[in-house]
Image (cartoon, grey):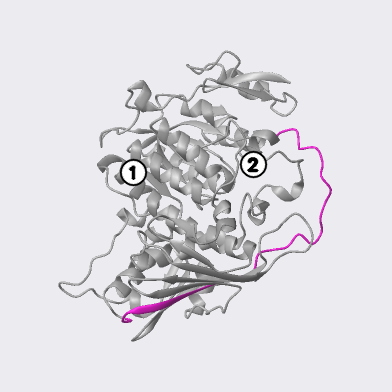
Amino acid sequence: MTSERWNGKNVSTDMNRIRRRSFLGRASLAVAGVGAIGLPQIIPSRVLGASYSQPSAKDRLNIAHIGVGGMGSGHLGYMLARQSRGDVNVVAVCDVDENRLAAAVKSTGGKATPYRDYRYILDRKDIDAVVIATPDHWHAVQTVHACETGKHVYVEKPACCTIEEGKAMVRAARENKICVQVGSQGRSQREAFLAHQYIANGMIGKVHTVKCWHYATPSDDNPVPDSDPPPELDWDLWLGPLPWRRFNQRYLHGVFRWVLESGGGQIRDRGAHVMSNALHFMNADNTGPVSIETKGRVPTRGLWDSAIEMEVTYQFKNPDWTLIWAQPGEMVPYFDRERVKREGIREGYGAVYYGDKDKLVVWVGDGQVYTEKKAVEFVKPPGGVDVPKSPRFDHHEDWFEGIKTGRKTIMNIEAGVATAFLCVLGNLSLIVGRKLNWDPVKQEIIGDEAARRLMSRPQRYPYVL
């Protein structure tokens, strides 16, 4: 065992688990501010008196990508397209999987500096903003650290895995005046805007129930034994704030979503899209449920422990309405069958908004959002209710505008955390096996000390809030 320093503190590290490979070593050691043995010291901008961000409207943003597999590769492709138009500079990429990292560097024409450890990126004063597309258990820690070093943040959904993490994210963004966009991009879609406008203008009357549907979470029916991690993967760094455990193929990539501590199942994956739109349409980002009650079926074998089937009922007050996450729930087929074939519409998840005059169906909820013809053809009358709209119906563009103008993004950190709390609380109710009462102002579980203790969890040093 050896002792390393990070952020002015000692930490014992098994060097067999934190390997320094030549692929990253040369680039990492070139970064200014790196500590004596190679780990950067992350110092908040308020301590340094630095102003890393807030570029003027005419400046290019220097962007770094943390996590470049899956959704991360999509974000990188988008930013490279923007770079070709002179809007941004992609200056750095980071991933704990060297194959993914090498592919990302290649996509930039070899121009972006590669890193395996995100802390080197945060130590660079020339970087204005970061796009975080790591597994869910990393979102909060990396967002808080990015905010503390003055970087604007686009972070994938769900925003957080615990209540404590969500509160820390909101606090860090506010204290450091950081523009955060959470990647529930459905709010920026054209037909989400049209559905929102239709509902806000009273076309279905007062909404009393929103019922979401989604297909079940998969189960690990063919478990495999633990093994050594593949040579391209820094397993210790992938785990980050999670407790140490042996590598298993059922943990990554992508399938981390079916493990409660790193993913949380379909409710924390797609629920962060469908229920994000529900809060948005109901103007409920700054409120919250007063009770949460879950029933469901959990796996009996394998590593994946997220609920296979579940139904969560959230009760809201002032105004009174009910939100239901039903997994699998009752699917409503999309009405235009030709469009389903033509555009590859996924009908497996969505929500029905029930009002006292009518109802409205909204399908999907993330990069695709579709609604009924009556909402698409609706023309807002003079003096009607305006609802938020992202520039060019582009979620990233909305983030850029937020950085430049200082206004809140359409899926700002408060909204992202509010949505994530729905997902977290739904799982917690199932874990403890009872209804939870929630204080939406204090953002705390009330009257249940055992459940309250699950609002936070230990994090492995140095990857802590």
Q: Is residue 72 depicted above or below 438 in this figure?
A: above
Q: Is residue 207 magenta?
A: yes
Q: Which mark is residue 242?
A: 2
Q: Is residue 43 depicted above or below 314 in this figure?
A: above
The residue under label 1 is which amino acid type?
A: Phe
Instruction: Tell me the SS state at disc 1.
Output: helix
Q: Which mark is residue 435?
A: none
| Image spot of residue 244 (x, y percent) | 71, 38
| Residue 234 visible at all | no
Observer-nearest of 449 and 120: 449
| Image spot of residue 163 (x, y percent) | 50, 51
The answer to which image quadrant residue 186 occupies is: bottom left
Crowdedness near tag 2: few (<14), some (14–19) or many (≥20) residues, C-alpha within 10 Å: many
The residue where tag 1 is placed is 400
Which residue is most to the left? 382
Observer-nearest of 102 and 278: 278
Mark 2–mark 1 distance (CA, rounded to whole Å) = 32 Å
- The range drawn in magenta is 204-233
| Image spot of residue 295 (x, y percent) | 62, 72
| Image spot of residue 337 (x, y percent) | 51, 79
Q: Is residue 56 depicted above or below 370 in this figure?
A: above
Which residue is most to the bottom? 357
- Residue at 55% from the left image edge and 70% from the top image edge: 293
Q: Is residue 351 magenta?
A: no
The residue under label 2 is which amino acid type?
A: Leu
